[in-house]
Image (cartoon, rainbow, N blue to C red):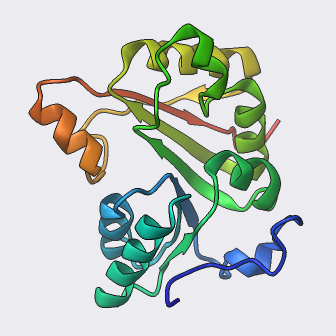
Amino acid sequence: MAGELVPANYFQRLGRGEICRDGRPLEVDLGCGDGSFLIEMARRHPERDFIGVERLLGRARKVCRKLTRNQLANGRVLRLESRYTVEWLLPEASVSRLHLLCPDPWPKVRHHRRRVVQVEFLEAVWRVLEPGGEFLFMTDHEEYFRWAGEKVAACGGWEGQEWSEETFFYPKTDFQRQWEGEGKAMWRLRCRKPLSGV
């Protein structure tokens, strides 16, 4: 399918050359849903490459069709689970920005272990980000936002960054539009891997 990224081996880390084009920053959208964020970012930034990660086949196909229809050669879709992609597939220091927007908050305490944001996940994010790369997390769930902040702090080394709606161009996801329409606030966490990478 046009626009789909299909690894030769799902049980081996991708080579940098398989996903990175020389001199072009790579951004990854975990759980890209209907692709609205991915499409707008790819359209706005033709000088960057984008990979949307989506587990559900129907959604992944829909996003591929949108990329093709909009003639966005700088966007691709990987049909896979987000955490597995970050922890086992993406190459080291290959990603300039990693976006995790409106993931399932798993609000019940007994389900917190199912949340994507865990220390092990953040350690993997650190590994795949290039020096100076950013992790951007957004949720409408305040407790999950606090949880994510605690996990980032537990990892150490991250540099907190300002992130308001005016900071830079950032299209809204379908979930964000829905929740803001219901009067809910969005909680944002933006942190940077230092240029030293230490």
Q: Is residue 39 left or right of residue 49?
A: left
Q: Position of residue 185 (x, y in %)?
A: 23, 23
Total labels: the figure holds 0
User: Nearest the camera: 7 or 109?
Assistant: 109
Outermost residue, right side: 12
Residue shown at the point (40%, 38%) measured from the top left: 102
Q: Position of residue 182 (x, y in %)?
A: 12, 29
User: Nearest the camera: 183 or 23?
Assistant: 183
Q: Position of residue 19 (x, y in %)?
A: 69, 75
Q: Is residue 69 above or below residue 34?
A: below
User: Nearest the camera: 27 or 159?
Assistant: 27
Q: Is residue 116 left or right of residue 62?
A: right
Quarter of the rendering containing residue 112:
top right
Residue shown at the point (44%, 76%) measured from the top left: 61
Outermost residue, top side: 109
Q: Position of residue 64 (x, y in %)?
A: 43, 79
Q: Is residue 1 left or right of residue 42?
A: right
Q: Is residue 26 above or below residue 130?
A: below
Q: Can the viewer see residue 129?
A: no
